[in-house]
Amino acid sequence: MAGKPAVGQAFQWYREGEFARALEAARRLLEVDPSDVNALHVAGLATARLGDAAGGLALIERALAAAPASVPLWLSRGKVLLDAGREDEAREAFAKAAALDPAGYNAHLELGLLDAKRSRPRDAARSLLRAWRSRHDDVFAQRELFELLRAHPREFAAAPPAPRAPVARPRITLVICSIDPVKFEAAKRSFARAFGDWEYELLGIHDARSLAEAYNRALRACRGEIVVFSHDDVDVLSADLGGALARAFERADVVGVVGSARLAGPAWGWAGREPARGRIVQPALQGEGLELLVFGAPCAIEPGLEALDGVFLAARRDQALSLAFDEEAFDGFHLYDLDFTYRAARQGLRVAVTPEILLHHHSHGSFDARWSPYANRFVAKFPALASSPKPDFVPQRLAFATSGEAAAFSSRLDALCREGEA
């Protein structure tokens, strides 16, 4: 027990760049116990950083002989080898660490960075995706992966494997509230393209007193087993919308395109970056063009969310009728979505986003004077959610000139995801 604080101090000195002090502390520990794995570890790292790579590796090898399943030791061996220019051996060490800890972050990140450096973009992308999926709030692996996908479009140009056919073809109703005939017709055409030969019912509501009122009215009138509620200023960029919804509802009860696994206030993004999920295309915040916003590592339909954005919501009709939108509290056009999806999650329904559906939303959400009263009502209804937004919530934004380019990039990401699941 007495040696442990000294080991911790030695590692601290190493992290602070005081390699000589770290090495001296480790040597004192090794005089007491030559087999101290932690002391051997920090001594090896410090020795290598002081210019003796061979000596550092020898110390790490001694530690590995005693602890061959230690992921940190294999990672350190790889880093020392990499610094010594022995890339093949370094990659073997990182691969060993990844095999020992398949869900770990660091080994996959190191493999991805090394393979990218060695012009192996597909291998690098697979590893970076694994690293990102192990830490949804990670920015570094995500950024490196996206740079690879953009820099090597031909390497990732193959169409993603076709999703499997859904188990069933449920009846679908699409509900669009709109007071703008031009927007309504444009949305109608976009959904028709996306549904293709999938039969669906369209309900246009043009006299809504609120979105909650309109959606409740639609639920009472529609015939679909699954009901989709969409804003009128969207384009559906993905194909096979019916199949995507059917597959999503095999694993979920309420489905959207962006949301959060944890709600911490009257906006789904207030819980920060880590629980956010989904993808969507929006106008650029500055200048011309568009941005693809990516939240989390959206490779699969993920149940377990607490909130979804109302730009696109889908639910089972019977469950939605029972739950109902709260048209008394939310008698306007804000917070109806968070209220509905949060209550659904609290009642045990499986709330999820699906990466198979990509939308181009032609506007940004706004927290304006019209939003604030409904935010106050929401917090009054759910007092435990009173909070302030987390400052780290900045989604990954990728600039594109056209929605087609954004969709093509998203398709390459989908291909990589499905390749990893195959």
Image (spheres, rainbow, N blue to C red):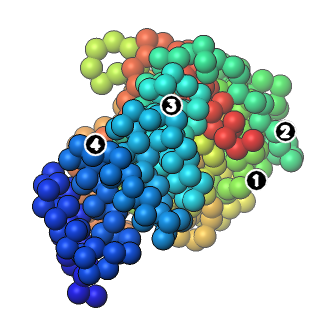
The span from disc 1 to disc 2 (Cα, nearest Å) is: 12 Å
Left or right of 300? Residue 115 is left
Name the front one of labels 3 and 1. Answer: 3
Q: Please name whichever residue, 160 or 20, is drawn nearer the observer in this view of the structure.
A: 20
The span from disc 2 to disc 4 (Cα, nearest Å) is: 40 Å
Residue at image point 47% right, 17% down = 151
- Please tell me which of labels 2 and 4 falls first in the chain: 2
* Location of residue 324 by image quarter: bottom right
What amino acid is labelled 1 in the image? Glu
What amino acid is labelled 3 in the image? Asp
The span from disc 3 to disc 1 (Cα, nearest Å) is: 37 Å
In the displayed structure, 15 sits above or below 417; it is: below
- Please tell me which of labels 2 and 3 falls first in the chain: 3
Residue at image point 28% right, 73% down = 30
Residue at image point 58% right, 32% down = 123
Name the front one of labels 2 and 4. Answer: 2
Task: Find disc 4 in the rendering and name its residue.
Answer: 367
- Please tell me which of labels 4 and 1 falls first in the chain: 1
In the displayed structure, 327 sits above or below 248; it is: below
Structural crowding at the residue carrying mark 3, measured as other residues with C-alpha within 10 Å and reported as few (<14), some (14–19) or many (≥20): many
Secondary element at tag 3: helix
Secondary element at tag 1: loop
What amino acid is labelled 2 in the image? Ala
What amino acid is labelled 4 in the image? Phe
**Where residue 203 appears, x then y in whole percent?**
67, 35
Tag of residue 115 = 3
Left or right of 166? Residue 93 is left
Tag of residue 165 = 2
The span from disc 4 to disc 1 (Cα, nearest Å) is: 34 Å
The span from disc 4 to disc 3 (Cα, nearest Å) is: 43 Å
- Please tell me which of labels 1 and 2 falls first in the chain: 2
Name the front one of labels 4 and 1. Answer: 1
